[in-house]
Image (cartoon, helix red, strand yellow):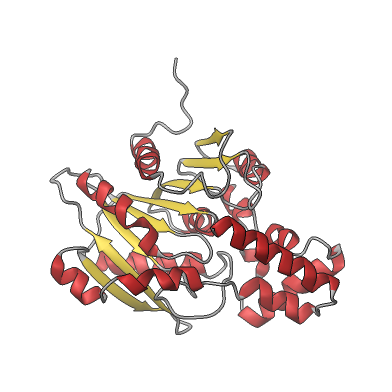
Amino acid sequence: MKRLILTFCSALTVCAVLTGCSIDQHAKMLIQQDTGHGKRQYWVLPQAEKMVKSGTISAARLYTMPDGIKIDLWVYKASTKTKGAGTVLFLHDVGDSKVTYMRVARKLAKKGFDVVLTDLRAHGRSSGKITTFGALEKYDQKRTIEKLYKEKLVSEPLYVFGFGLGGAVAIQYAAIDPRVRGVMAMAPYCDIESICRKAFPLLGDEDIQKTLVRAGEMGKFDPADASALKAIATVRCPVLLVHGKFDMTVPYAHSEALLAAAGGPKELDSQPLLNHISIHFNRWDEMVKGIEKIASGQVGKTDK
C-alpha cells in the first residue's frame, strides 16, 4: 500500500510539472510533506501519560525549540542491568512517526540500551508544518538529547539510527554532536537537492536552484545546510550504511556516494533483493544487530 501511495504521489508531482506549477508551488510541495500516515498511527494508542503509567514507555517529553516548534519524544529505559550499553536514538522516515519503532525499542531495552523515540518536526505529535531535510532537524535532536542528559533519563555512549529522512538527519546530527559514537543509516539520501531533483524530474537546473532557494525562504532555513553528503566527511564515529539495490525511492547510489565521502570508520551493507520498503519493514532483529555491531566497534572491520 505504501509503495502504491509513493507511486501515486510521484505521478501527481510529474503532472504538476507538466501543468506548469510555479516555483513557489514546487517549493511548497517540497517542504510541506504529507505526514498523515504518521499521525494516524496514534489513533490506536492512548495518551502518553497513560502509556507511562502502564509501563509501556518509561517517560514522555515535549520539548520546545527556540523557534517555537515542539518536539515530542518517548524514552524506554534499559530493562536489564547491563552497564555501559548506552542510548540509541531512533529517527523515522518522511511521513512516518516514532510509533514505528516501539517493537525494536523494547528489544534494545532488553539488551541494556536506553532508547529514545522522537517525532521529527512536522511529524507525529511534534508541531510544525515544514520539513527541512536535516537543516533544522539535526539541531532539534542535539537540544532534546541535551535535555534528556540533564534529566538523567539517558546514558552514554549515544548511538543514532535513522531510516530515509531519518538516516540523512542522523548523519547530519553526528557531524554536530561529538557525543554520537555511531550511526546506522538505512536508505539515507545525500541532500535536499537530490530529493528535489527526484521529486521534480522535469525541472531544469536553473529552476531546481530557484525552487531550493524559495524553499529555504519559506521554511526559514539554508538548503545548503541540509546535506548528509557534506556532513559525513566530518563525521569521525563509525557509520553503518544499509541500502537495498532495488530502492527506487532513494537509489542505492546515494549510499555509495555517502560511503565514498565518509571520513571515519564506515561500511555499506548492500541488500541486493530489497527496496525502500522491504529494507525496513519488520526488520527489527537486523536493526538490533546493526546497533550491536556499531557498539562493539566492528564497523569497517573485515573478517580475517
Tell me residue 196's x, y (percent).
71, 64
Q: Quadrant of residue 272?
A: top right
Tell me residue 219's x, y (percent).
62, 79
Going 68% across and 78% down the picture, which residue do you hit?
Answer: 28
Q: Nearer the viewer, residue 38 or 4?
A: 4
| Left or right for 86, reference 71 | left
Going 75% across and 60% down the picture, which residue do you hit?
Answer: 197
Tell me residue 235's x, y (percent).
52, 48
Q: Quadrant of the N terminus?
A: bottom right
Furthest residue toward bottom: 68
- Asked whether the viewer can see residue 61, the reply is yes
Figure disc tally = 0
Q: Nearer the viewer, residue 46 or 141?
A: 46
Q: Taking 48 as reference, is 172 above or below it?
A: above
Going 51% across and 47% down the picture, which residue do you hit?
Answer: 186
- Asked whether the viewer can see residue 151, the reply is no
| Left or right for 8, reference 111 | right
| Left or right for 216, reference 157 | right
Q: Quadrant of residue 179?
A: bottom left
Tell me residue 130's x, y (percent).
57, 77
| Left or right for 271, reference 71 | right
Going 44% across and 33% down the picture, which residue do you hit?
Answer: 299
Q: Quadrant of residue 21?
A: bottom right
Q: Quadrant of the C terminus?
A: top left
